[in-house]
Image (cartoon, rainbow, N blue to C red):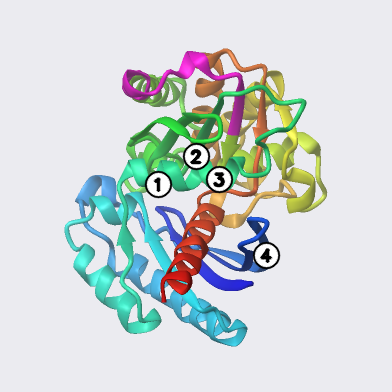
Amino acid sequence: MTRVAGIDCGTNSIRLLVADYDAATGELVELDRRMIIVRLGQGVDKTGRLAPEALERTFAACREYAVVIKELGAERLRFVATSASRDAENRDAFVRGVVEILGVEPEVISGDQEAEFSFVGATKELVGADHLEQPFLVVDIGGGSTEFVVGDTHVRAARSVDVGCVRMTERHLVVDGVVTDPPTEAQIAAMRADIEAALDLAAETVPLEEARTLVGLAGSVTTVAGIALGLPAYESEAIHHSRISYDQVRAISERMLTSTHAERAAIPVMHPGRVDVIGAGALVLLAIMERVGAREVVVSEHDILDGIAIKTAEEAVADQRRS
C-alpha cells in the first residue's frame, strides 16, 4: 500500500483526502476526507485579486490539514489549485503561504488538467457498470468554473469554462455588496444567458451530444441530490451514485431561486457556505441537462480529489519501481 494525501483548493472550498492505494488492484482506500468552505475566490471575478481575508481563511484550513497529514503519515502530498488561483494577480502570495505551511508548492493546473483529474476520480468505479451506457459526460460544477469531459475508459475531449456557482452569484445576484434574496427574474435571465454562452464554448471542444450517461460532481450537484433524496442530514453514502431525474433538478432549481436565505439555510443537507450560491449552482446543472437532453444525472462523491490521489499514488509507485 502507498499512502498519499491530496488537496483540492477551489474557488469555494478546500478539501483533503488521505488514502491508501493498492497498486495491484488500483483500489483507493479512504482514510480521511474533509472539506472547509473558505471562499478563496471571494471577489476575484471583480477585482482580479485574492482578498486578504480569503487568503487567511485558506491558510487556516491548510494548518488544520497539515496536522492530519502528519498524524496519518502520508508518504506524498499533492496540492492542486484550480479556478480562483489561476485568475488572481496576487497568486504568488497564495503560493508562498501554502509552501510555508505544507512544504509543497500548489500546482495551479489548467482547466484541461482539472478535467482529467475529475474524470479519473468520478468514473473509476463506473466503467463496466451494466446499467450505465458510455461514453460518460462528467461535469464538475465548481465555484469559479465548470469542467466538461467526455470519455469512456479515457478522456476523449475536455473543456473548462468560467461559469460556477460563486462566479455566477457574484456577477449577477450581488447588488451593492449584498446577495439579492431571492433574485429577480431579470437577474436569473442574465445568469442563464451567461451559462448558455459558456455551454456554447464547451460544445466547441466537447461533443456534448455524444454522451450517454451524465455524471455530476462537486458541492452544488451533491447538495441538489441530498435535497432530492429528502435526507435528514448530509449522508455521503446515500448521495454517492444516486440518480436524480431532470424533473427533480428543475423543481429544486426553481425552489432555490425563489426561496429566501433563511428558507435555504433550513434545508437539512445545506452546508452554511452554500446557502447563497446553491441557486446559481442548481441552475448550471439544469442548463447542462437541458442542453444534452439528459433524463437524469448520476451523482458522484468521488471527483477531482480522488483523481489527484490516484495519480499521485501511481506516480509514487512508478518512482519506487525505478529506484
The correct choice, above or below, for 239 with respect to 323 in the image is above
Toward which corner of the image does residue 189 lie, by quadrant? top left
Mark toward the viewer: 3 or 4? 4
Q: Answer whether residue 228 is visible to the viewer in this image.
A: yes
The mark lying in front, picked from 3 and 1, is 1
Q: Tell us which disc is closer to us: 2 or 1.
A: 1
Q: Quadrant of the image for the C terminus?
A: bottom left
Q: Which mark is residue 140?
A: 2
| Distance CA(mark 3)–CA(mark 4) | 18 Å
Q: Return the disc, 3 or 2, that comes first in the chain's sequence.
A: 2
Q: CA distance from mark 3 to mark 2?
A: 6 Å
Using the image as rendered, state which of residue 201 and residue 304 is in the foreground.
Answer: 304
Quarter of the image with the N terminus is: bottom right
At mark 2, the secondary structure is: strand
Q: Amino acid at mark 4?
A: Glu
Q: Identify the mark nearer the N-term, 2 or 1.
A: 1
Residue 234 seen anywhere in this rendered image of the structure: no
Q: Position of residue 228 (x, y in %)?
A: 75, 34
Q: Amino acid at mark 3?
A: Ala
Q: Are marks 1 and 4 in contact (CB under 8 Å)?
A: no
Amino acid type, residue under disc 1 in the picture: Glu
The residue positioned 43% from the left and 43% from the top of the image is 116
Q: Nearer the viewer, residue 271 or 2?
A: 2
- The residue positioned 22% from the left and 57% from the top of the image is 49
User: Which kind of residue does numbered mark 2 sit on?
Assistant: Asp
In the image, residue 103 above or below residue 297: below
Secondary structure at badge 3 equals: loop
Rendered location of residue 86, percent (x, y): 26, 52
Q: Is residue 322 above or below residue 134?
A: below
In the picture, the disc for residue 30 is 4
